[in-house]
Amino acid sequence: MTTLNPGPRVVKQAIHWMLKLRESGHNARLQQQCEQWRATHQEHELAWQRVQSLHQELNLRAVPGASVALQTLENSSQRLQRRQALKLLSGVLVFGSAAWLGKDLQVISPLTADFASGTGQRRSVRLPDGSLLQLNTNSAVDLAFEADQRLIRLKHGELLLTCAKDTSAPGRPLLVSTRDALLQGFNGHFVVRQDDNCTRVSVSQGTVVIHSPGPTQWIHAGQSYRLDTRGATLLQNQDMDAGAWAEGLIVTRDMRLGDFLAEVGRYRHGYVSCADDIADLRLSGVFRLEDTDKLLQLLPQTLPVTVSYRTRWWVRLERLA
């Protein structure tokens, strides 16, 4: 499955909408017009999400030149100056931030990673030592198998690793590195997921050692940990089976609907959300991932919700009237 990459023209349009909304404050009509533009095509929505992500994460001031454009826009009271600011900001973001455009859509990683998977794709790879590496949707890893270690670098996404005994060079540790930690597996079967603000590790067999951050921590079968800059935290009462995706499933246990839809959204292009008044509804069950549209259509059978498609790629759940 290929990943849609918004072109520069559409990204400029998304930036234009963002700046207009920023300038107008809470203008309901303008907000509605922006939503209509987003709903007309998947490419529009993806470009909008990337522009919003950059605005939230970097406040548009970490991008070289963006602060000048924003300052011009914010201090301007004349149409000409606003247009100049938009032109400058559009040029800075579209032509100077190619890596940013690929952040969520992963345009860059599949080209540079040793192994990668697309949105909705799962991939299995037999490693040189016999270990089995499985990649979940939208994931990428690099390998560094050397004389003194076997290292898997998780660049983004999620993996499931089934460790094999290293017969060619006994004694080499099998390691997984993420943004937050260095993990060592011992004849085990474990999942590593790198989210925006943490790494999650779930062990189903064997043992995993956390070498960083903080003191060495042992994770045993049946345990899950959250790892971030503050250290390792044992997770209790998990609302989802961490490794079920390897079988093409989402298995939930009293999971919030809002969290469930965020999880489903990882496996499909476009945007799926729900109204705030139903986000805390709970659901438990086993859901198949091969067709996320069919999966979503199952929800009204157990919850008081309706599923509506604003476009093929923009799905919204509302409370049943």
Image (tube, rainbow, N blue to C red):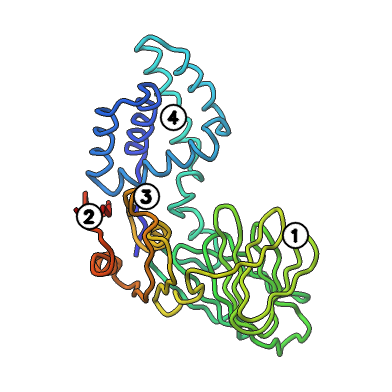
Which residue in the structure is indicated by mark 3?
5
Q: Which label is found at residue 27?
A: none
**Rounded to the nearest whole Å, what is the CA distance between mark 1 and mark 4?**
40 Å
**Rounded to the nearest whole Å, what is the CA distance between mark 3 and mark 2?**
17 Å
Percent of width and height locating residue 75: 47, 13
Which residue in the structure is indicated by mark 4?
91
Residue 94's place in the image compared with 128, above or below, is above
Q: Are marks 3 and 1 in contact (CB under 8 Å)?
A: no
Q: Amino acid at mark 3?
A: Asn
Label 1 vs label 4, nearer the camera: 1
| First in residue order: circle 3 vs circle 4 | 3
| Residue that sits furthest to the top in the current view | 78
Which residue in the structure is indicated by mark 2?
312
Local secondary structure at mark 4 = helix
Looking at the rendered image, the quarter that the N terminus falls into is: bottom left
Q: Is residue 160 left or right of residue 231?
A: left
Q: Which residue is at a point 37% across and 38% down the rendered structure image?
A: 11
Q: Which label is found at residue 213?
A: 1
Q: Which residue is at a point 55% across and 67% down the rendered structure image?
A: 114
| First in residue order: circle 2 vs circle 1 | 1
**Rounded to the nearest whole Å, what is the CA distance between mark 2 and mark 4?**
30 Å
Percent of width and height locating residue 197: 59, 52
Given residues 146 and 316, the one toward you in this image is 316
Crowding at mark 2 (Cα within 10 Å: few <14, some 14-19, many 20+): some
**Rounded to the nearest whole Å, what is the CA distance between mark 3 and mark 4?**
18 Å
Label 3 vs label 1, nearer the camera: 1
